[in-house]
Amino acid sequence: MPFEEGIREYQLKPVYPIHQSTLEYNGYVQLEIPKDAVVLYPFLDYLYETWGMENIRLREQDHTILFFIRAGERPLTTKGFFAEDILPFSIKGDIYHEEGHLIFRSSYRKTSLELPIDLLESMAELAEEEGISMSKWVEQKLSSLLK
């Protein structure tokens, strides 16, 4: 049912706010949860209420929901799921439950390289031609070399 219909026809009201302050960018943790998983809706409620829509991105797929959650930590105050319930769905990054907090750590780390300017410019042009960021372009090239 559309949100507006719920408010208009059934006088439903939101139970909690979905906005929180934006966490400092330290990468994302990625999870993929099947749509029929028991933990999906309690976890989704927790994310919206505690992390806020500013810190999560969702992508619906045929049978799963792909989550991109900004790395950081927030209190785990829900009774709808345990941190261990979401661990099997982790794709990238680390998930911890410590002292009443759910902690997401990205599997990416910022690095700096000293490279000649002309090489950097060439890499930027190639990345732009492929429609991706230079970081993504470098990641793809290095991954293919290391395989």
Image (cartoon, grey):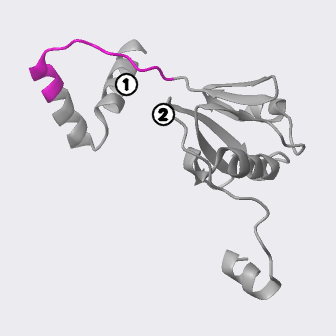
The reply to whether the C-beta atoms of the residues labelled 2 and 1 are less than 8 Å apart is no
Q: Which residue lies furthest to the bottom in this view?
A: 9
Camera-side residue of 123 and 71 = 71
Q: Residue furthest left?
A: 118
Q: Does the magenta stretch include residue 115?
A: yes
Left/right placement of residue 14 relative to residue 104 reads: right
Residue 115 location in percent, x, y? 19, 14
Q: Give the range drawn in magenta.
A: 108-121
Q: What element carries label 2?
A: loop
In this view, the residue in front, 42 or 61, is 42
Q: Is residue 108 visible?
A: yes
To which residue does mark 2 refer?
25
Q: Position of residue 46 (x, y in %)?
A: 76, 47
Amino acid at circle 2 = Tyr
Magenta highlight on residue 20: no
Kindly report the distance in space between the C-alpha atoms of the residues bearing marks 2 and 1. Answer: 19 Å
Residue sitting at the far front: 21
| Residue at image point 26% right, 41% down | 130
Residue 34 seen from this side? no
Report which residue position mark 1 lands on. Answer: 139
Q: Residue 73 location in percent, x, y?
A: 67, 31
**Spot occupied by residue 109 in the image (x, y as percentages of width and height):** 46, 20
Query: Where 62 sits versus 96, above or below?
Result: below
* On-image quarter of the N terminus: bottom right
Give the overall secondary structure of the magenta segment.
loop
Quadrant in the rendering for residue 120: top left
Using the image, determine if residue 12 lies above or below residue 45. below
Element carrying mark 1: helix
- Residue drawn at x 76%, y 29% is 101
